[in-house]
Amino acid sequence: MKRPTAVALALVLGMASGAVAVWAYQRGPALGSASLSPEWTESQWPLAADQWGSGKFFHCGKERCGSETKLYVRAKIGFCKCDVGVDSDEELERIGDLALFSAAPAALGAGHPIKVAWMKGRSRAFTLGGSFFTKASALSVGFNDRCDAITATVVTDGSQAAALEPAVLDFLNSERVMGWAKLTLGL
């Protein structure tokens, strides 16, 4: 290989590895890393009141969740299809709260069934847009008890909301959240 070609190749490889390093740094720790262990801190509901009122708001920092992550959980009394519940992506979209965070969220694939305590529902990942380095993502979760639904929306400044799903479902199944759900749903 001629010297000018070798120098050019070395420069291109150096720039590419630098770009990958910046991307990896901005993403935060990998979800498979031992240092990642979500810890949810409750704060006051930060959103303006609407017809569904407020709910529970939790935050997980970059050091614990890989990126700044927010979890919004609230009940929607009498808003679910009583006969089948949250059984489709269309129903999840109808009852979910993604419109509070993006005018045009883009699904990253089909949703899938989930279970939270005794309730069945659905989960689906979305991207909220932005540039390559600042892309935000979301996870929409909805589940129901008869005609009443509970929605959970995870919004993260990283691209890994879908990867946080197991930790989010564990938290939604916790006594902390289920105690609130039972009280809110009048059970």
Image: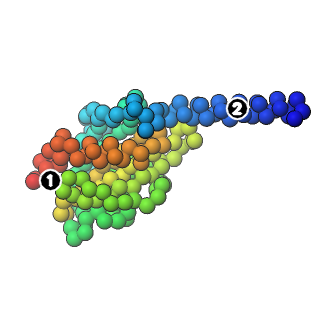
Give yes or no for contact between labels 2 and 1 (Cβ–Cβ under 8 Å): no
In this rendering, does residue 99 appear at all? no
Q: Residue at x 25, y 60 (%)?
A: 120
Most extreme residue toward the front is 1
Depth check: 27 or 101 in front? Answer: 27
Q: Which mark is residue 185?
A: 1
**What residue is rendered at 21% in x and 67% in y?**
82
Q: Position of residue 172 (x, y in %)?
A: 25, 46
Q: Compared with residue 157, is residue 138 higher up or lower down, i.e. above or below?
A: below
Q: Residue furthest bottom?
A: 83
Q: Secondary structure at mark 2?
A: helix
Q: How is the image coloured?
A: rainbow
In this picture, residue 89 sits left or right of residue 132: left
The residue lying at 13 percent from left, 50 percent from top is 182
> What is the quadrant of the N terminus in the image?
top right
Q: Which residue is mark 2?
A: 15
Q: Is residue 60 above or below residue 83?
A: above
Q: Amino acid at mark 1?
A: Leu
Q: Residue 63 vs residue 130: left or right? A: left
Image spot of residue 185 (x, y percent)? 14, 53
Point out the tag, 2 or 1, that comes first from the N-terminus: 2
- Could you give the CA–CA distance between mark 2 and mark 1, rounded to whole angstroms? 55 Å
Residue 22, how many percent across, how many down?
58, 31
Viewer-nearest of discs 2 and 1? 2
Disc 2 marks a residue whose amino acid type is Met
Q: Is residue 19 left or right of residue 122?
A: right
Residue at 75%, 34% in the rendered image: 12
Please identify the residue farthest to the left as the structure is shown: 187
In the displayed structure, 169 sits above or below 23; it is below
